[in-house]
Image (spheres, grey):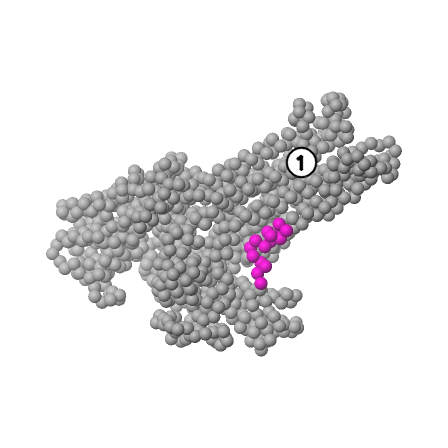
Amino acid sequence: MATRLLALACIRNESNNRDLSPRPHYPSMPKYPKGVAIQENIEDSEVKVLFSVVGMTCSACAGSVEKAIKRLPGIHDAAVDVLNNRAQVLFYPNFVNEETIREAIEDVGFEATLIKDEVNERSLQTCRLRIKGMTCTSCSTTVESALQGIQGVKKARVALATEEAEIYYDQKIVSHNQLMEAVEDTGFEAILISTGEDKGKIQLKVEGVRTDHSMRMIESSLQALPGVQDVAIDPTVNKISLSYTPHETGPRTFIQVIESTGSGRFKAMIFPEGGRRDSPRQEVIKNYYKSFLWSLVFTIPVFLTSMVFMYIPGLKQGLDVKVINMLTIGELLRWILSTPVQFIIGWRFYTGSYKALRHGSANMDVLIALGTNTAYFYSVYSVLSAATSKEFMGTDFFETSSMLISFILLGKYLEVLAKGKTSEAIAKLMDLAPETATLLTLDRDGNVISEQEIDSRLIQKNDVIKIVPGAKVACDGFVLWGQSHVNESMITGEARPVAKRKGDTVIGGTLNENGVLHVQATRVGSESALSLIVRLVESAQMAKAPVQKFADRISKYFVPLVIILAVCTWLAWFLAGKFNGYPKSWIPSSMDSFQLALQFGISVMVIACPCALGLATPTAVMVGTGVGASQGVLIKGGQALESAHKVNCIVFDKTGTLTIGKPVVVRTRLLKNMVLREFYDIIAATEVNSEHPLAKAVVEYAKKFREDGENHVWPEARDFVSIAGHGVKANVQNKEIVVGNKSLMLECGISVPADAEELLVETEEMAQTGILVSIDGEVVGLIAISDPLKPAARDVISILKSMNVRSIMVTGDNWGTANAIAKEVGIETVIAEAKPEQKAEKVKELQATGLTVAMVGDGINDSPALVAADVGMAIGAGTDIAIEAADIVLMKSNLEDVITAIDLSRKTFSRIRMNYFWALGYNLLGIPIAAGVLFPSTKFRLPPWVAGAAMAASSVSVVCWSLLLKYYKRPKKLETLQISGIMVE
């Protein structure tokens, strides 16, 4: 509490603060009582446990368990999943323990057991590493195998395209430092990106520090703060790196403490950004560029002396002057100039080869090192022989080794440049956050007294931020004051601005359009929606598509096979020349048969390209998932992309998916004489205990008959029972109430009169849901509820048909309403009155017929089907459980994005197929040409340096082909649909 007050006092006393007029007042503005401080101080010790709860049959059971848990002291949150018979509880162990929670569940009549395996997952951590030095699939496979072999590592994924590794490990068994050591043992450099721990990180620069004592004093002051996990100091640049718990402290507190420690002598600020996500890649690009330029300095003279000056009279004679015996000035110059290229500029290929061979694998560096060394050391042999003999007439290949290295460096430079563009989607997302924010200072009554511009990274939880028209929203939060329209297209892809007023939530990175808003921060830093989306896209780009296994299998044997082919090529040509297998006229005047064979062998070795195969899939997946994110379609990895492109059957949920998801009561028909208010009082008392959307619609409608404001107190309902897919029963005012469908009435032995039957048929024909109400065994009324169709539903089903995708609707609603809705949208196959587990069973039945099935849903009851389907698509506005279960999240909640997801996946896999076609075709055609199959008939041969240039070009072309996905556009039918939709509105 003292820390917070210190920060608030600091803000109030800033000299650049100024009064505002008028001063908005927030009656509901949260204050900072002692209780809040205690809550925040213990939040870092929050514990998550999972219980198996036996005996739950409906949402009412889940509700009673949840209420029992939440009544206990020290409970932060509780969620009960009736479908899987589980309860997840977040609590503070200082106040309550697992046994007390278990007893509370059993007190309400259910059997509870702590699931210890899930509890142990609390120690499961995610670590992300940047790995420098990988050049091909063989490298990434070596690193992945090394990480997978460590005890405590559950799963490891290494992505060549992003040069990153994602490791899921048990922190009780292994640490992230040991993971980094394992990577470095394989010969690659590992840099820690994140450990996935739930804590914030920030780097501060401190000015005014002149002694080590001052820095130690600052370190001690920071370590003493509650919530500070770790403090690391770099005295060379006066940098302090802090890890902390965001709920308990924040960067402004650190700055205040530092500046207070030095009595005004020290000045603290956010450390100047050099650590952007793309900075390591920029460093690699710069290194390749410098290496290439330096190689040109030496290679161009080598090229000129060997291939140009030899044809210029005067220069040729000068270069042919003998130095020692048969050694000429030209040969000596080429030797001197090519040596730095081979051993200094090309040293990276030696280190890469050594690392690979040390672990029993071979990569592209091995091929390059073998090829260039063969050319270089044969040339050295030729030069030394000429220097020691008066008769030796030989030819050197110094230009081959130096030009080969130069072209490969150029290719690698262009490749990393292109690879950097594949992850632009993430960079654009990260750039959405504004650099500065306007912080408001409030008095105890919630009045605004001053404002101050701060770095947006200094925002802390519960801060109040002012958002002016045209400014970006600085953090996630809710509106305290003001109204405006906010453009959320950069996050959700929704083109139309969304109206915001008091109580509405806003997302960081979105654009405020036409009004001033005061927003209270709820999620900052790594907890924000923007950060979550970035992490989801990053994780998706790490995940390998199954088709990638094809390249991984080939990479194991590719390099050894190429070396064998190169040796066989050299041997075949050498033996053919030695035993007069071809005419002497075939041999160029400057060579002998051995040298000709050597050139063919080197060409085979350097033209083969494993990199193109390794990059074919990941680069396309990276661009595809990035494009999807920009369109409001979050695709969770290559597996989802690959499955989505095969989809030929989509199962739609009805409520909230095909329909808007906000049912309303449109008609009431009473079959007995009674007051409508009393009728709805009884129904609302029963339905208020249910979580079903239809129940909520009835309760909301019932409120219209009350005059006691927002605090509606309904009569007490006893013996409440919810029957999934049918309705509810309860005892209200000593009357037995049954509210539900016709099946429920018949199950309860209640006869449905003919006039009620007619009303039901009439209601269902109008695509409305009819709910029967029974009091004491007699049907007394019918409520008609309508859930309007989404505007584009019919057109989406029509477009899917044109894409040869079959549409099916599965719903828990009655058959009459389901058939009416299906007829309206054009769906032919309908399954109605289906329970959650029956939806999953239907998906499995369709899969058994050979169909690739996608499920589109939004609710908890859809999650089993979402998991069972080949591709689960969750509506973004749906429940967290549905979104977690899905493979693809449709952020805009628009049905049109189902088509976008399928079309984008098809386009992406079309690129992947083309990439593989090119990569394989290049090697299958290039290797025989390099081996000289065309030489006997056309006298065409591929010099090694040209083969090296072709190898480099193949990798670049694969990446560029993937980059063309950046220009993806949705199907024209969807664009036409969107325009017509806007015109209708």
Residue at position x 12%, y 54% from top? 672
Going by the image, does 349 lie left or right of 2? right
Going by the image, does 776 lie left or right of 167? left
972 w.r.t. 892: above or below: above
Residue at position x 54%, y 38% from top? 915
Residue 447 visible here: yes
Q: Circle 1 — which element?
A: helix
Q: Is residue 276 magenta?
A: yes
As drawn, which residue projects farthest toward the front?
A: 313
Going by the image, does 313 lie left or right of 6? right
Residue at position x 59%, y 51% from top? 281
User: Residue 833's x, y, as percent?
Assistant: 28, 45
User: Residue 644's x, y, as percent?
Assistant: 43, 41
Which residue in the protein does label 1 denote? 946
User: Which three-letter amino acid code belongs to the residue tagged 1?
Assistant: Val
The residue range painted magenta reads 272-286
Pick whichever, 365 or 393, lies toward us: 393
Residue 90 visible here: no
Q: Is residue 445 magenta?
A: no
Place residue 611 in its image quadrant: top right
